[in-house]
Image (cartoon, rainbow, N blue to C red):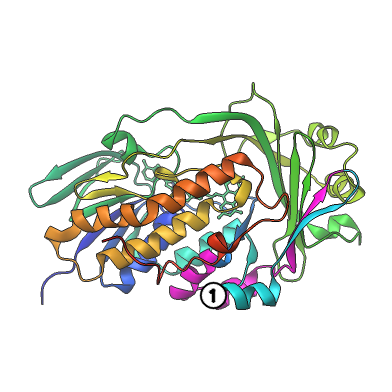
Amino acid sequence: MATPLSIAIVGAGMGGLASAAALRRVGVDVSVYEQASQFARLGAGIQIGCNAMQVLRGVGLEARLRSQSFYPRSWNNRDWKTGEVKFDMIFGESAERKFGAPYLLAHRGDLHAALASAVPDEHLKLSHKLVGLDETGDGVRLSFANGVTAVADAVIGADGIHSVVRDILFATSPVHFTGRIAYRTTYPAALLRGEKIDDCTKWWGEDRHIVIYYVKPDRSEIYLVTSQPEPEFRIESWSAKGDVRELRKAFAGFDRQVEQVLAACPDVHKWAIVDRNALERWGEGKVTLLGDACHPMTPYMAQGAAMAIEDAAVLSRCLDGVERDGVANAFRRFEATRKQRTARIQQTSRANTWLSGKTDTDWVYGYDAWTVPLAA
Ligand SMILES: Cc1cc2nc3c(=O)[nH]c(=O)nc-3n(C[C@H](O)[C@H](O)[C@H](O)COP(=O)(O)OP(=O)(O)OC[C@H]3O[C@@H](n4cnc5c(N)ncnc54)[C@H](O)[C@@H]3O)c2cc1C
């Protein structure tokens, strides 16, 4: 029997792990290289759109995610002051029937751990920070900061918005600072002392917003994330701390629910919101990018990870049954299949008007990465 195709995946984030899980299903021998020495459980929530859940179901994670995540009746959109409903995007069973998969609200750490559970430990190499790539006659050589080198038939750069793989391939423009910052945290809902809040609401202010939702099936933990102007702040890190008093001040006068959630909030993280313009090309030869490495976006549609996860399913379909000499073409086919959709989602996210009024959502949530036609 011929040896299976070997693919090195750089980055064990949402897209890298989803790709490893999807590629294993089609018999590819994957190795995932991650710079971190361990996975941290970040205090963040994540919306898992029906479109992402289609993919996650296909890699066997639906039951686990349903049991650990919150199943909201809707994603409501309300005026910051009057509470008037601008658009209530109904999820729950009716959306599940329509789009073919549930909409879930999760702790980011739970989604990441679920994805990691789909990749056996021996395929995952922590403390491997990629520093170099060279295409050789029969594959690609990867060099890591720890001195290790490895050779694979092909490489997937799933190394996020600051992708080293992208920087090796192309001279790309620096990240685009939006002039806005986000505060975010998760905390035990018990701190609300019995005050009731909606399942999931985006409170729209004049130049700022806050999104609040539960991330556990028993409503025991809540998540909040904001966006507001602060052009001077340029630290873009998952671990930088913010000042909760500043946050409360910034949202003073918002609906009582918002004020209560912020009053109970023990501490917060703060970071600058960035994105990039769509890339012209996603790869070269036997190397491709995927996820935030090639189409990072502002978080306003809650679709960044969903796009990385969709990428994983489409890429696995493009590589299904492909021999070594067909990999470069399979990568270009992947790019051609995915580019238009991800660019449209990047643009729509940047506008920050998603669900602010009656919105056609079918094209986003109704996409099934397992069946969508592949480019010729
Ligand atoms: C505030 C906020 C809220 C969001 N909310 C949502 C949401 O509700 N729903 C949603 O779908 N998306 C959401 N997103 C977007 C989502 O987080 C990203 O789109 C997603 O994480 C992208 O996945 P990725 O695998 O491409 O990159 P990442 O998840 O960033 O993973 C990249 C991985 O590569 C590793 N790495 C980097 N460089 C190297 C290197 N040189 N060598 C080895 N490893 C390396 C990193 O350590 C990391 O583990 C949100 C984003 C933000 C900022």
Apparent side of residue 262 relative to residue 277 in the rendered image (left or right): right
- Looking at the rendering, in which quadrant would you find the C terminus? bottom left
For the residue pair 128 and 227, the one nearer the viewer reads as 227
For the residue pair 330 and 128, the one nearer the viewer reads as 330
* Residue displayed at 27% across by 37% down: 169
Q: Give coordinates of residue 110: x percent, y percent.
A: 58, 63
Residue 270 within the segment the image draws in magenta: no
For the residue pair 243 and 7, the one nearer the viewer reads as 7
Amino acid type shown at disc 1: Glu
Residue 77 within the segment the image draws in magenta: yes
Q: Is residue 147 visible?
A: yes
Q: Give coordinates of residue 131: x percent, y percent.
A: 29, 37
Task: Provide the residue span drawn in magenta.
Answer: 51-80
Apparent side of residue 47 relative to residue 120 in the rendered image (left or right): right
- The local secondary structure at tag 1 comes to helix
- Looking at the rendering, in which quadrant would you find the N terminus? bottom left
Q: Residue under circle 1? A: 62
